């Protein structure tokens, strides 16, 4: 029985078919997210993390509450009978931090953050906030417009 020679294109066609099948099988495995659930929940030996507030400096500064996931620095000020609490001082924040300033005043006024040209109406007896990314370095006064009280100086480094 005579043997028939295989044409030059047949091995190439077979190779392309095998390659296509391998690629399709490989891509399909990664396309679907895993739906397997572990029989036991994963455990961690690392201690839980605790948010901390930076240690206040010796100079009087407005209070800073513990950081929240969305805000890096919370500064809270209260104004009563033209007195600022905590007393006027400097508050230092890092460049790029998300800062929220919350002010409660016993009289209607307007909060203003110099250098950032941000402001908020302060209704009497109700807290109002301004939130911003501290992206400019320098020293900026935070004040009220109508009563002209300097609440604190914001230092961005």
Image (cartoon, rainbow, N blue to C red):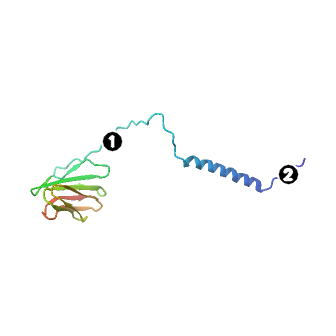
Name the residue at the right extreme. 1
Q: Whole-percent x and y of residue 47?
A: 35, 37
- Measure the alpha-carbon separation of dots 1 and 2: 75 Å
Query: Is 95 in front, or is 40?
Result: 40
* Number of residues whose C-alpha sits closer than 10 Å to that of mark 1, classed few (under 14), some (14–19) or many (20 or more): few
Query: Is 99 in front, or is 155?
Result: 99
* Number of residues whose C-alpha sits closer than 10 Å to that of mark 2, classed few (under 14), some (14–19) or many (20 or more): few
Quarter where residue 48 is shown: top left
Q: Residue at x 25, y 55 (%)?
A: 100
Give the mark nearer the N terminus: 1 vs 2. 2
Q: Whole-percent x and y of residue 6?
A: 81, 53
Horizontal side of residue 106 vs 30, given as left or right: left
Query: Is 31 in front, or is 72?
Result: 31
Label 2: element kind:
loop
Q: Whole-percent x and y of residue 81?
A: 9, 56
Label 1: element kind:
loop
Q: Residue at x 66, y 52 (%)?
A: 20
| Camera sees residue 89 | no
Question: What residue is disc 1 on?
Answer: 49
Question: What residue is disc 2 on?
Answer: 4
| Camera sees residue 43 | yes
Quarter where residue 50 is shown: top left
Q: What numbered label is drawn on residue 148?
A: none
């Amino acid at each position: 029985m005579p043997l028939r020679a295989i044409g030059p294109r047949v091995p190439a066609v077979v190779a392309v078919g095998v390659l296509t099948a391998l690629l399709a099988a490989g891509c399909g495995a990664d396309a679907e997210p895993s739906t397997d659930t572990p029989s036991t929940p994963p455990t961690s030996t690392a201690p839980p993390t605790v948010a901390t507030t930076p240690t206040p400096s010796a100079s009087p500064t407005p209070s800073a509450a513990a950081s929240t996931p969305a805000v890096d620095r919370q500064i809270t000020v209260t104004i009563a009978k033209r007195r600022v609490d905590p007393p006027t001082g400097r508050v230092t924040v890092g460049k790029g931090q998300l800062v929220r300033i919350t002010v409660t005043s016993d009289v209607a006024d307007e909060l203003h953050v110099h250098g950032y040209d941000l402001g908020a109406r302060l209704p009497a007896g109700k807290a109002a906030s301004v939130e911003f990314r501290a992206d400019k370095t320098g020293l900026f006064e935070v004040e009220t417009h109508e009563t002209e009280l300097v609440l604190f100086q914001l230092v961005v480094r």
